[in-house]
Image: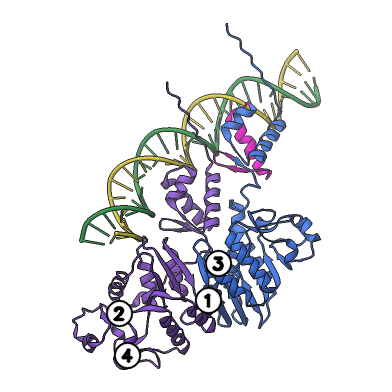
Chain colours: A purple, B blue, C green, D yellow
Amino acid sequence: MFIFVLIVTIMLKAERQQIILNEVRRHNRVLLPDMADLVNVSVDTVRRDITELHRKKKLQKVHGGAISLGFHNYNYQGVQVYSKDEKSIICEKAISLLRDGQVILFTGGTTNMEMARLLPPNLKLTCFTPSLPVASQLLVKPNVEVIFIGGRVSKDSQITVGGSAIHMLSEISVDLCFLGTHSIDLSHGLTEFDWEIVQLKKSMIKASRKIVAPVISEKLNTIQRYKICDLEDIDTLITELDPKDSLLGYYRDKRFELL
Amino acid sequence: MFIFVLIVTIMLKAERQQIILNEVRRHNRVLLPDMADLVNVSVDTVRRDITELHRKKKLQKVHGGAISLGFHNYNYQGVQVYSKDEKSIICEKAISLLRDGQVILFTGGTTNMEMARLLPPNLKLTCFTPSLPVASQLLVKPNVEVIFIGGRVSKDSQITVGGSAIHMLSEISVDLCFLGTHSIDLSHGLTEFDWEIVQLKKSMIKASRKIVAPVISEKLNTIQRYKICDLEDIDTLITELDPKDSLLGYYRDKRFELL
DNA sequence: AAAAATATTGCAAAAAATTGCAAACCATGC
DNA sequence: GCATGGTTTGCAATTTTTTGCAATATTTTT
């Protein structure tokens, strides 16, 4: 004998959209398949619902689901005037250094932001950063815990600087620091044009066991006003060039690793 | 032997509509065929009844049935069109409270974000916030100094939470706090569904001399799981409604200011 | 560069809405 | 009683909406 118990909860479209909207409001970010499961319809239908709610300005439709209107995501498309290839090569090399469970420190800058964007979603990390754009990129990675270094935010760079940030850095110790920089030079080391950011980066160096500097070759052999550290202070230099490239000449004599 | 018992209750139209209306109020939503079954008429008739009740604004007619007006609160067509206007009305009132030189604390949420976006460019403020979206809006204001409250960032809300943030808050004291909230109720006060955010907001209240709560009327008389504070703890309640609006009834008896 | 996930589009079946219409019903007044 | 005009109700034909599916692009991830 078979007993079929079929429980079909018929749901109105309006009701369904209400549930989706509540879920978005509550979690700020929902995935399409989750919603389809929740309200028991196909993903196509949920997609259509989300599209409709998007048209009505009740939420923001994004690839893979929806986010609440208040949820700001930095899309620095404009910044990508840089050759994307060089940057992704560097990021790829940098990401290959990462292992599950590590605690990482990211400075600001477009390279670090791109790197955060390219992090594989399965990588489990704890990331500290004083950069708003970097943080917002990291936030969409499901397995990354983000800890923001607070303090006064510099308008230009969208990085927290100043005593409070430096104090917070003095209390942490991380495995790896990806140190973005504006200029690098054989004799002058790493330099920057903003005094406050230099102070911050000095603290970051102190807080990190290993320093990795991703540097686009354009920045090689340029100098800015203020010094962050010597070449000797960094452990790994990453460029998009072949390590045998002539541009890297004297850098090879240094003790750090060249990728 | 068959016994047919046919009970036909002859029903007046008004009576029928009252039953439908009660059913809607009780269940928040009804399906058209169910109603036809309940009141023993064709679906066409019920449809006509619902259309009529919809015209009279007693319920909301939707495809396949009807939903109660209270239920979809902040969802439905008419409401959401105004949603942005409501928010700007609130923001305008809130911004009118600000003076040059003040030190302000913004929580997260869409209202605070919108408010940050609408700040007049000439206003000179120092703003603390644990919210990434709010911070990024504040950053484009030339005369606003932004200080970010650091700590672990909650993925859902893009707000820093946890001990570090609370500690940082314990060291500051500001003039005004714009306290966003999910729900407000006469007897339950301000409530929220996320425990960590509640803790954070409690700290924010302690750090502020004056508490202003901008609340869209949709959120009035709703309750969430965890309590932030009593109504008595806030100094000003801002809604988009006219202070004489009946919805605000008992709120007028409270000691705080109503805008 | 390949693979996986997500979007888009067109389509068809089912459900629901609309429309026109006629029968039934009600209240008047003759 | 009976005719008149108005309302209500159910029915059927037609149109619209909703929904899932499949084939095809596009985006994201590996």
**Element under disc 4:** loop
Q: Earlier in the sequence, mark 2 or mark 1?
A: 1
CB contact under 8 Å: marks 4 and 1: no
Write down the chain letter for disc 2: A
Residue on which the image places disc 2: A236
Task: Indicate which label's residue lies in the foreground, 4 or 1.
Answer: 1
Q: Is residue B154 left or right of residue A115?
A: right
Mark 3 vs mark 4, foreground winner is 3
Residue A144, percent from left and from top: 42, 64
Give me the residue at 53% from left, 58% from top.
Answer: A57
Magenta highlight range: B40-65
Q: Tell me the residue that label 3 is attached to.
A: B161
Q: Which residue is mark 1?
A: A150
**Spatial separation of the CA atoms under disc 3 and disc 4:** 40 Å
Estimate the x, y position of residue B76 in percent, counting from the top left.
Answer: 59, 51
Name the residue rendered at 21%, 78% in the picture: A242
Camera-nearest residue between B66 and A244: A244
Q: Tell me whether circle 2 and circle 4 mark residues in contact (CB < 8 Å).
A: no
Left or right of B188 on screen, residue B75: left
Which residue occupies the foreground of this view, A202 or B35?
A202
Amino acid type at circle 2 is: Thr
The chain carrying label 4 is A
Q: Is residue B194 magenta?
A: no
Q: Amino acid at mark 3?
A: Val
Mark 1 closeness class: few <14, some 14–19, many ≥20 residues within 10 Å: many
Left or right, A48 with reference to B55? left
**Amino acid type of the residue that numbered disc 4 sits on in the rendered structure:** Thr
- Left or right: where A1 falls relative to B33: left
**Percent x, y of residue A252:** 22, 85
Q: Is residue B179 visible?
A: no
